[in-house]
Amino acid sequence: MQKLKTANLYRSELIPVSGKLVESYNLCLEKLGFKATKLKTFSIDGLGWSPEIAEEKKDLQYLNHGEANPHGIIISPLQKGKPVYVPTHTFDRDMMQFIFKEHGDAINDITRDCAICIDFDQHIDTFFGPLDVLKYDTVSINFHLINNLFHIQEEQLELVEKFNQGNNFVNETIHQELLDSAKKHGDLRHRKLYLKPIEFKTNSFFTKAFGGIYVLRDFISPIVVFQDEEAHKEAIKDTVHDVLIYHISQPELIDKLRDHLIIECNLDEVVKDKRYDRIKKVMLFNELKKTEHSYKDILNDKVLFRRYLNTIDANALKRVTGVEIYLERLERSNAFKIADLVDQGFYFALHQPHSSLDVKQYDLIWRLLVNVSPKDVLFLYWYDKEQFYKSYEAWNESFQDWVIETISNNI
């Protein structure tokens, strides 16, 4: 991962945490029912998740009480706008942006000397079956301060009110109470210390629950797509919910998404796009075994690319160049079918969200498509970084160099 870090492609926007902030973070962990970290320094993302603590606890989702109960921690206003690197849901970053939009001023004030625990309440105590994710509707976002600062503020205000009553201004006991509170907590009278619970409305989304589930419910009919085979098998036994259920590996899924105007693929236009060239290069890389040149040179140099293209067998050549062969033959006759000439994975990878979708739907459907056929390394990095990092570690070092260069040139 060092090369990715050098290229600022690996969790490059984490916020360093040390000193008193570590103590505040630990108090949040304990308030949320988790064990404190033993680390003296670490880093966090926009949600308050730390890769170092996740490694320490050997739990990537250490801020969750089960799959239905995620939490967050805010210890700095610098978390505003930062990425959420290991989201439980695709809308997690949207929720954090919503929080800072609604309570930005109060967060700036509170985090001067306090930390905020966030409870994302989907009104589901625990999942009993995979289709329980359909219950996701409105998420209630609740806030808790680690040192009950808001209640201490109320106590100070009550003391001030008491001080101003009658002749209490000469009461030394009240004087002392005010002084003791101010010395310990500061003057809290004019600070914004209350964070009203807010509600976030969900629509279509992806969740990591049950091995990964896409819930598409903004379209002709609800569609649920499973990444895990066992969860899919359990879900198809359901007779209660009126939804279409697919496993992500089913070819019928792509047909249904096209029928519902969720995705589209115009091969005549796609072959002119840079995305087609990237995917074609990945297709060739997957076919090459032994090479005299580095993969980076082969994929960047047109002469070398053609040379190695002509070294693979006929079936492999068809997998790499099938789209062009199909389009060429289609000009002469309509008798040819895509499935006869174009590799299925290649064809699926060339699909894109339907032009009628809005921006938020676009991002979710792009993620679904790169999970169906992860052959575009740039879009895999953009839309599913966790899967990208897993794939990256298994790639040849020279191919890694090409991937880093490809992503860096398109950011």
Image (cartoon, helix red, strand yellow):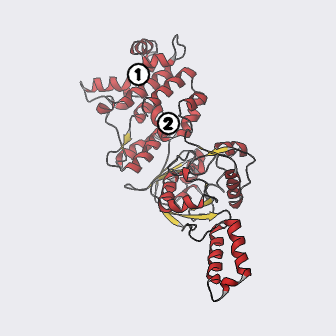
Residue 173 x, y percent position in the rendering: 74, 80
Horizontal relation, residue 41 to residue 355: left or right: right
**Residue 318 disc label:** 1
Residue 386 x, y percent position in the rendering: 56, 40
Q: Quadrant of residue 196?
A: bottom right
From the viewer's side, name the closer residue of 265 and 256.
Answer: 265
Select label 2 or label 1 by which is in front.
2
Horizontal relation, residue 242 to residue 154: left or right: left
From the viewer's side, name the closer residue of 26 and 288.
Answer: 26
Residue situated furthest bottom in the rendering: 166
For image coordinates 34% across by 30% down, the residue present is 273
**Residue 381 disc label:** 2
The image quadrant where one finds the N terminus is top right
Residue 78 vertical placement versus 148 (above, below): above
Element type at mark 1:
helix
Residue 54 x, y percent position in the rendering: 67, 45
Q: CA distance from mark 2 to mark 1?
A: 27 Å
Residue 25 vertical placement versus 263 (above, below): below
Q: Quadrant of residue 39?
A: top right
For image coordinates 55% across by 41% down, the residue present is 13
Residue 354 x, y percent position in the rendering: 34, 45
Q: Give the mark nearer the N terminus: 2 vs 1.
A: 1
Q: What amino acid type should be assigned to the residue bearing mark 1?
A: Lys
Residue 117 vertical placement versus 358 (above, below): below
For image coordinates 57% across by 49% down, the residue present is 208
Element type at mark 2:
helix
Residue situated furthest right in the rendering: 38
